[in-house]
Image (cartoon, grey):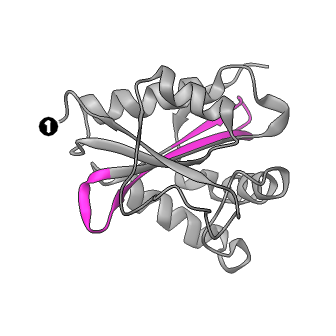
């Protein structure tokens, strides 16, 4: 089976919602702030369209030739600072360890440096998630302490977290 990384499309909405539900059941390091049961495929398709029409937000998916989804990555501009985008990356447990997360992060960084209007990627990661931290560090993300992550327990997970950021060298 061949998997590709591509932009999420509105036609992915039902599969994306199913992926998010499965990811939230498989992992306690992956958090979704919105109740997935309140979002239908039509609303999600509208969300995907809105995201992809901006230059400071992005949604990528890992898909096969039949449009089944195995992972995703998002960059979402902060409301109070639209030049900073928060990163989220998740891969189905069965497909972890094959470089898919690294491929998604590489694509996010390329987008950030060549197309977007952002100047920084930012994320929060649980300190116990050492594989993710290793990947982020490999791409140049640095640990920072700021108002968004002060090293205390994350309320959603009850696990210590840390903020990491990567400054963009390109951008427009």
Asked if residue 76 lies in the magenta stretch, the reply is yes
Is the N terminus in the top left, top right, bottom left or bottom right quadrant?
Answer: top right
Q: Residue at x 73, y 19 (%)?
A: 98
Q: Which residues are magenta?
A: 60-84
Nearer to me, 146 or 89 = 146
Name the one closer to the observer, 34 or 40: 34
Does the stretch in magenta take in 17? no
Q: Position of residue 42 (x, y in %)?
A: 59, 70
User: Up-down: is 25 above or below 107?
Assistant: below
Which residue in the rendered view is the most extreme toward the left? 172
At 70% from the left and 63% from the top, the residue drawn is 157
Tally of numbered tags: 1
Image quadrant in which the C terminus is located? top left
The answer to whether any part of residue 57 appears in the image is: no
Left or right: 19, with 162 as reference point: right
Prevalent SS, magenta region:
strand
- Secondary element under disc 1, as helix, strand or loop, is loop
């Amino acid at each position: 089976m061949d998997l590709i990384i591509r932009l999420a499309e509105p036609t992915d909405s039902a599969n994306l919602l199913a992926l998010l539900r499965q990811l939230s059941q498989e992992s306690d390091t992956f958090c979704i702030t919105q109740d997935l049961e309140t979002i239908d495929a039509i609303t999600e398709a509208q969300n995907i369209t809105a995201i992809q029409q901006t230059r400071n937000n992005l949604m990528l998916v890992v898909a096969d030739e039949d449009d089944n989804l195995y992972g995703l990555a998002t960059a979402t501009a902060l409301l109070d600072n639209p030049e900073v985008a928060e990163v989220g990356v998740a891969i189905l447990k069965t497909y972890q360890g094959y470089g898919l997360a690294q491929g998604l992060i590489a694509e996010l960084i390329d987008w950030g440096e060549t197309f977007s209007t952002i100047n920084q990627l930012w994320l929060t990661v649980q300190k116990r998630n050492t594989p993710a931290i290793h990947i982020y560090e490999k791409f140049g993300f640095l640990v920072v302490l700021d108002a968004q992550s002060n090293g205390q327990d994350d309320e959603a997970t009850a696990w210590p977290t840390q903020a990491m950021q990567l400054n963009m060298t390109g951008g427009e």
